[in-house]
Image: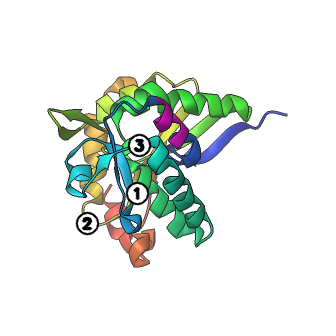
Amino acid sequence: MPKLNNTHIHFSAIISYKKILKIINKINNNNIYINEDDSNLLIGYNNDEINEKNGILYNKEKHEKMIIDYINKCYNKNKFSCLEKLGSLFYNIIKYEKFIKNYYLDEIVNYMKKHTIKYMNVRILLGTVYKIVDGKKIFLNINEELDLLYKYKNYFNIIICISKCNKNITSKLINILENIDNKYKEIILGYDFVGDESKCKSLEDNIDKLKEI
């Protein structure tokens, strides 16, 4: 029986990290770097952030087992901290424009077909996808980012996350609403406001700011 819909899933957590590692091994063309420090393991494309952390070229024979062991170790610990650690590990891969465009979005479709999911509501934090220009990390604007997703509108809508609500919550949402092209509004199902959970804050702590919207 088809599952039909998945109504709550986050963009960067749809595909398993081991599957992403398989893609990395397949496409590695000497521009993927890894920081080997086990306490702060990172992989990503050549950019200032990776290089500043003593990144070296990723090598399948040398690094694949190290990463798989790290993944398994994370899953054997607290699940919440596990997701945070693994998210950091793969962040610079998942958020890279060419990786999303050439591999990640198609892999999402493959995942949906494999698990007989007809449609998904995907939560996403805008303003985090980047490209590399002259060795520098440049973030895409909102419409460039939405354009990547728009081509897959037959597979999912998106729910825009506004995370760690604070005094800037109003300006964050207004900036998004004012700058999104009408073309892309058809794929936006809604907005998800998240309190600053790292400080044990809920949305109730921001109720006055939410009323301003």
Work out whether 158 lies above or below 84: above
Q: Residue at x 27, y 51 (%)?
A: 50
72 inside magenta stretch: no
In-image side of 144 versus 85 (left or right): left
Closer to the N terminus: mark 3 or mark 2? Answer: 3
Q: Residue at x 39, y 42 (%)?
A: 93
Number of labelled discs?
A: 3
In the image as oriented, which residue stretches furthest toward the bottom?
Answer: 200
In-image side of 79 versus 131 (left or right): right
Mark 1 → mark 2, Cα distance in angstroms: 26 Å
Please tell me whether the stretch drawn in magenta is mainly helix, strand or loop: helix
Q: Position of residue 48 (x, y in %)?
A: 19, 48
Q: Nearer the viewer, residue 13 or 53?
A: 53
In the image as oriented, which residue stretches furthest toward the left?
Answer: 134
Work out whether 19 lies above or below 195: above
Secondary element under disc 2, as helix, strand or loop, is loop
Mark 1 → mark 3, Cα distance in angstroms: 19 Å
Numbered mark located on residue 167 in the image: 2
Q: Write the start and end of the magenta stretch as one range.
A: 21-26
Q: Bin the neighbour count of mark 1 within 10 Å (Cα to Cα): few under 14, some 14-19, many 20 and up.
A: some
Labelled pair 1, 2 in contact (Cβ < 8 Å): no
Numbered mark located on residue 88 in the image: 1
Q: Please name which of the two marks, 1 or 3, marks the residue nearer to the observer.
A: 3
In this figure, which residue is indicated by the disc labeled 3? 59
